[in-house]
Amino acid sequence: MNMCELIDKKKRGLELSTDEIYAMISGYTRGDIPDYQMSAMTMAICFQGMSKRETLDLTLAMRDSGSVLDLSSIDGIKSDKHSTGGVGDKTSLALLPLVSALGVKVAKMSGRGLGHTGGTIDKLESIPGFNTSLDTPRFIKQVKDIGFALTGQSMALAPADKKLYALRDVTATVDQLSLIASSIMSKKLASGADSIVLDVKCGSGAFMRGQEDAEALAAAMTEIGRSAGKSVRAYITDMDQPLGNAIGNAIEVKEAILTLKGKGPADFTELVYTLGEGMLTSAGITSDSETARILMEKAISSGSALDQLARFVRAQGGDDSFIYDENRLKISQYSTNICADEDGYVTGIDCDSAGLASLALGAGREKIGDEIDHGAGIMLHKKCGDEVLEGNSLATLYSSDEGKLKAAAERLKAAYHIGKEAPGKRSVIIKEVV
Ligand code: URA
């Protein structure tokens, strides 16, 4: 294979064969193809796109670039869930204990946050002692023992994607549908679950800002998963404002705990229930959504979902007393409020700016390896559609570094849009892609 010829082929809009895609990905993983040639290829893909067949081949080649987790020793259907990422997205922290309390076997790999979107692993590390790095035997044993384990991304799974994603990140080639779909699905397929529920975000805080693009991404990922023999369900959900009220790490864990105590924000709770319906029905726990919802409501009111979160935290070395008393989770000591300058209604909260405000407080990292302040973050008191009066507090910002508050507050204030007219009602669930 001559990489220059392949780049030229794609540049001219021609399809790459299965063998060419496999040779390119294995050559790149081994280090035989240099970054400069691969970045020319990803840019050509951005301009010319890929066919469905090419996208599937790229996914499978990246899946096969490392090991594929074998979960067959665990009885029953193994389930996974993936979100394309957003601001305030703590869904896994509430959803996975909830469905695993009802018998779904959850084996999940999660990532760290980078840039303005958070990562589940960073959030869980707000709990003292929590171990986010399980080796494969321990990961599998935990799913067998308690029905739920979660670990950080292992280098052994889809190493081609890890390398390619880092390259795309610095060459402005992230936002191409086939590249995103193959990147996400190669990792999901390598993680070994039988059933995958996808939460595809749409709006100002998402890769896909428009609904049409989000639907196309969801359809592409669903098709890839099904072609690889998996059960896949995908939902398009709103990321035009932050999810729930909390943005950060410890503050989001607190909100997830409150949700498992039945006291979560309405939009977040609705998202958890909807994805939960997908997971419970795909795993065969029940065949209909109504029953699934009743089961979840009971698991929350009886405390069994919260107990399952505590069991999971304990199994991974964390101090579960923080789960039963969420106020023990440390929120940073310095705080400031932003207030409304006029009467009206909140008509929008720009997700990117809210995420960047949280980053500026210390809750995220700008580059891999940066330390994060787990107690830093934001509590939104007003969301889209809420009425505000001049002087009302819109949000409180927290940081361990007092000097970071002012700039972050200015950024968050600019994210809020206040208008005289109440905006139309919006739902966090936009649609299920079938
Ligand atoms: N998340 C991924 O894992 N890959 C992408 O390309 C985009 C988001």
Image (spheres, rainbow, N blue to C red):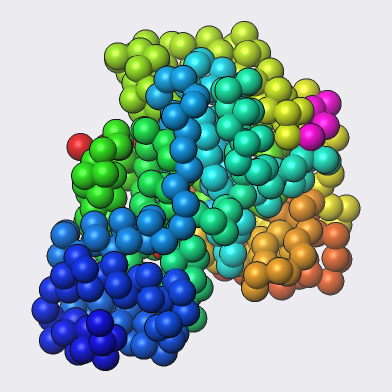
Specify whether residue 333 is painted magenta: no
At x 75%, y 61%, the residue is 372
Percent x, y of residue 10: 19, 81
Observer able to see residue 71: yes
Q: Is residue 308 above or below residue 7?
A: above
Question: In terms of image quadrants, where is residue 402?
Answer: bottom right
Residue 201 horizontal side relative to residue 109, left or right: left
Q: Quadrant of the C terminus?
A: top left
Observer able to see residue 420: no
- The one nearer the camera, 395 or 333, is 333
Q: Quadrant of the N terminus?
A: bottom left
Percent x, y of residue 360: 70, 68
Residue 217 horizontal side relative to residue 358, left or right: left
At x 24%, y 57%, the residue is 56
- In what quadrant does ligand 1 lie? bottom left
- The one nearer the camera, 328 or 335, is 328
At x 42%, y 20%, the residue is 76
- The one nearer the camera, 184 or 145, is 145
